[in-house]
Image (spheres, rainbow, N blue to C red):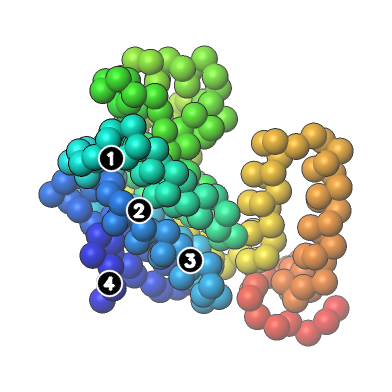
Amino acid sequence: MSAYQNLLYDQGEGVATVTLNRPDAFNALTTDLNRELKEALGTIAGDDSVRAVILTGAGRAFSSGQDLRNMQAGDPAAVVKDVLTNSYAPMIMAMRQLPKPIVGAINGVAAGAGMSLALATDIRVASDKASFMQAFSRVGLVPDAGSNYLLPRLVGLPRALELAWTARRVGAEEALSIGLVNSVVPADDLAGAAQDLAVRLAAGPALAIGLTKQAMLRSENSSLPEILALEAELQSQCIVTDDFVEGVNAFLEKREPRFGQSPSRI
């Protein structure tokens, strides 16, 4: 039973599935939903039994973006600055800093800040009914919730500018072709495909997976010498773990590794 008002939370097979649960509003984002998602991520970060995450939406949409009804009171400039600084920024940073893989199961439209949320996941599996839209320019705004950072790194600057300026709809197949998503599956297969991927990641070496995420995110703003030094540091952490021992044993014994256990030493 979910303890949240705006999310559904389910856990099994080492995977936490977090579902945005405002289907009547196309999972439009509010301060309360953002807070609950950040809280859920904090719970996941501290729960060693959770080794991978699925983020998806209830109903026909992943998220239609910011619920504008949630921003009508008070001085508009002050309200938007407060919401972006104290609601969106902590939520997006919690996703990026989570030392566990987040699989985005993009079930429908991801627009505006909802697209930013989708881009903040680590791997995206999209339904063939999914679509993406940088809707900000339609209401005279610039992209936010991390889109100015995330989108150019996924599709390149010229294409990111075109998507932001035109606010055109990008269907699932085009999203796959330009690198917005990793795969596209029939809508009826989305939950199963995301679960299969997340379970596979959950069965992997947790520390190595988390440190790989850290290293690749650091690479976006680091030089090659800095990353080479970081790799040496992170590898020194991994090589003393039981997962490394199990991986080597499995290789030598020609079997699949069973990570997360306590194998005997080589």
64 above or below 50? above
Label 1: few (<14), some or many (≥20) within 10 Å? some
Please state which amino acid type lies under the numbered disc 2: Asn
Q: Are marks 2 and 1 in contact (CB under 8 Å)?
A: no
Q: What residue type is labelled 4?
A: Ser
- On the rendered structure, is 110 left or right of 60? right
Which class describes the residues within 10 Å of circle 2: few (<14), some (14-19), or many (20+)?
many
Q: Which residue is drawn at 80% across and 65% down?
A: 237
Q: Is residue 262 left or right of residue 124?
A: right
Which residue carries the number 1 mark? 66
1 or 4: mark nearer the eye: 1
Instruction: Looking at the picture, tell me which residue is in the foreground, 199 or 257.
Output: 199
Is residue 193 at all visible to an observer of this figure?
A: no
How far, Cα to Cα, is label 4 from label 2?
Answer: 16 Å
Per the rendering, the mark at residue 42 is 3
At horizontal 70% and vertical 83% (from top left) the residue drawn is 262
Query: Which residue has dot 4 on it?
Result: 2
Residue at (46%, 17%) from the top-left corner? 161
Residue 158 locus on image (x, y percent) = 52, 15
Position of residue 1 measured from the top left corner of the image (x, y, whole percent): 26, 76
The amino acid pointed to by label 3 is: Gly
Upstream in the sequence, badge 2 or badge 3? 2
CA separation in Å, label 1 and label 4? 23 Å
What is the spatial separation of the Cα atoms under label 2 and label 1, in whole angstroms?
Answer: 10 Å
Q: Which residue position holds label 2?
A: 34
Q: Provide the secondary structure element on which disc 2 rests.
A: helix
